[in-house]
Image (cartoon, rainbow, N blue to C red):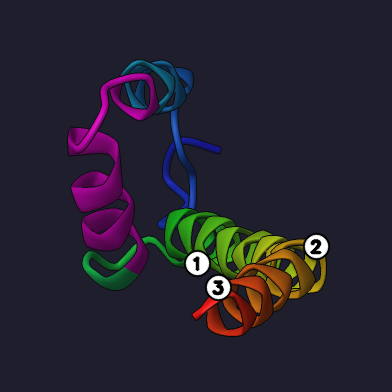
Amino acid sequence: MANDKNYVSIWFWLLAMIVMALPCINVVMILIWAFSGENESRKNYFRALIIMFLFWAVIWMILMAVGVAPAILKQIQESTTKV
């Protein structure tokens, strides 16, 4: 198993979990691990993390736009009618 080029050791995953807990460093390391090296299994995992983050970021933006946009428009409307 350790001879397989896509084998990722438990020590790497332990290190990865520790690094993922460090702010700012985690973003840089996710990008490095997703796009460099020869281990396809590791690259696919970190690419999936990026895709999942982007998916939830888009969902969050949509929810913010739906929830906040009407309040912003109402505030603009009220401020223009007061003048």
Which residue is at 29% across, 72% downward?
Answer: 35
Tell me where residue 78 sits by quadrant: bottom right
Identified by mark 2, the residue type is: Gly
Report if residue 46 lies within the magenta region.
no
Q: State which mark lies toward you, 1 or 3.
A: 3
Name the residue nearer the viewer: 69 or 7: 69
Q: State which tag comes first along the sequence, 2 or 1.
A: 1
User: Can you give x and y, in whole percent of width and height, for residue 56 in the image?
Assistant: 69, 60
Name the secondary structure under disc 1. Answer: helix
Under circle 2, the secondary element is helix
For the stretch drawn in magenta, the main secondary structure is helix
Instruction: Give the amino acid at mark 1.
Output: Arg
* Residue 27 highlighted magenta (yes or no): yes
Indicate which disc residue 79 carries.
Answer: 3
Residue 32 picture location, percent across and down: 21, 59
Dot 2 crowding, Cα within 10 Å, few <14, some 14–19, many 20+: few
State whether residue 83 is above or below residue 66.
below
Q: Residue furthest front?
A: 83
> In front: 5, or 72?
72
Name the residue at 49% across, 81% down: 83
Dividing the picture into quadrants, the one containing residue 43 is bottom left
Tag 1–tag 3 contact (CB < 8 Å):
no
